[in-house]
Image (tube, rainbow, N blue to C red):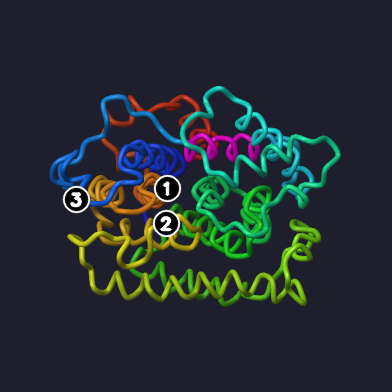
Amino acid sequence: MTARTHKLAATGSLIGLALGDAMGFPTEFNDVPSILAKSGPWREMDLPERAIVSDDTQMTLAVGKGLRTAMDRGVLAPKRLERPLREEFVDWYQSPENNRAPGRTCMVACNLLKAEGRVWQDASQIGSKGCGANMRVAPIGLAPGLSEEQRAGAAQLQSALTHGHPTALAASDLTAHAVRLLAQGAEPTGLVGLLRSYALENRTRYHHTWLGDLWTRGQDPSPEHFVARGWDECLGVLERLQQAVREGSVETDPCLATGEGWIAEEALATGLLCFLLFVDDPVMALRRAACSSGDSDSIACLTGAFAGAYHGVDAWPTEWADRIEYRGDLIALGALWDA
């Protein structure tokens, strides 16, 4: 552990996530030449004057508020978390602010979650492993006082409410675990190895108390077979990540190494790649993530979450942090967990 533990990791991570989101939002759906034509050299990219975020930050706040409500009510447990999460997701779905090109899976699932009496497993989109599952999971990595089992179960449950594919569950769990490790001061050079070990340890662990009978919606012979599919895809992309970090090619579009980030395991890997290429320069990490050919806002928001968890709030220029949309909400959540 390092002195970074005391640098307001939760606030740094949430602000970083929103800054990455705001930088990547205007470049999403563009290839790198188009981004360069619009924004100039990627190493000089600035935060847009109006630092507007996408659904990525909105849904992170929904997870954060749901988690805060659940933890205020007592020991974190599946039923205690599911209800406020579901309420926050439905509120987001119905909000007039939900006009930031939200993902189809989230919209379909949240519409189904509205129905009183419907078990959440019936709303879960079992075939979807979109990055919407893990772009929003950082709060579960940041909240203090959770056991490893609570953190893993909560990370997978928040994914499963919308994205029920086993790879979405595993990538969300890994993302929260990475945020936690970095907030605690783990050395970035060993991070991919720690994530691989975690994936191997959990490869056949199905969290029955958190997920219930979700696995029966797939075509799998057993819950262990169901989750192993997800962990295996994550292990595959972690291998590609390890290779890309070794090659250290900072001028190349990161999506070429670890994927475009539309799907959960690629968003995790490409977000991590941008952080690991610029461990000591978090702002440059965000710029690299935002200047990428894939799901730039989700990639950059994950990069910002990782960098902010590791460096704390001092990672970010004050004049950027001061004008990020939802700043008050982000700081209130961060302050609660940094305290």
Q: Earlier in the sequence, mark 1 or mark 2?
A: 2
How crowded pointer 3 is (Cα within 10 Å; few <14, some 14-19, many 20+) is rated as few
Q: CA distance from mark 1 to mark 2?
A: 7 Å
Q: Nearer the viewer, mark 1 or mark 3?
A: 3
Q: Tell me where residue 220 sits by quadrant.
A: bottom right
Q: Is residue 62 magenta?
A: yes
For label 1, the residue is 298
**Mark 1 belongs to which amino acid?**
Ser
Q: Position of residue 165 (x, y in %)?
A: 63, 61
Q: Nearer the viewer, residue 60 or 26?
A: 26
Which residue in the structure is indicated by mark 2?
261
Q: Amino acid at mark 3?
A: Pro
Q: Quadrant of the N terminus?
A: bottom left
Say which of marks 2 and 3 sits in front: 3
Q: Is residue 169 left or right of residue 136?
A: right
Closer to the chain start, of discs 2 and 3, is 3
Q: On screen, 150 above or below 93?
A: below
> Position of 165 compared to 241: left or right?
right
Q: Which residues are magenta?
A: 55-68
Above or below — where is 323 with respect to 182?
Answer: above
Residue 249 is marked as none
Q: Which residue is mark 3?
A: 33
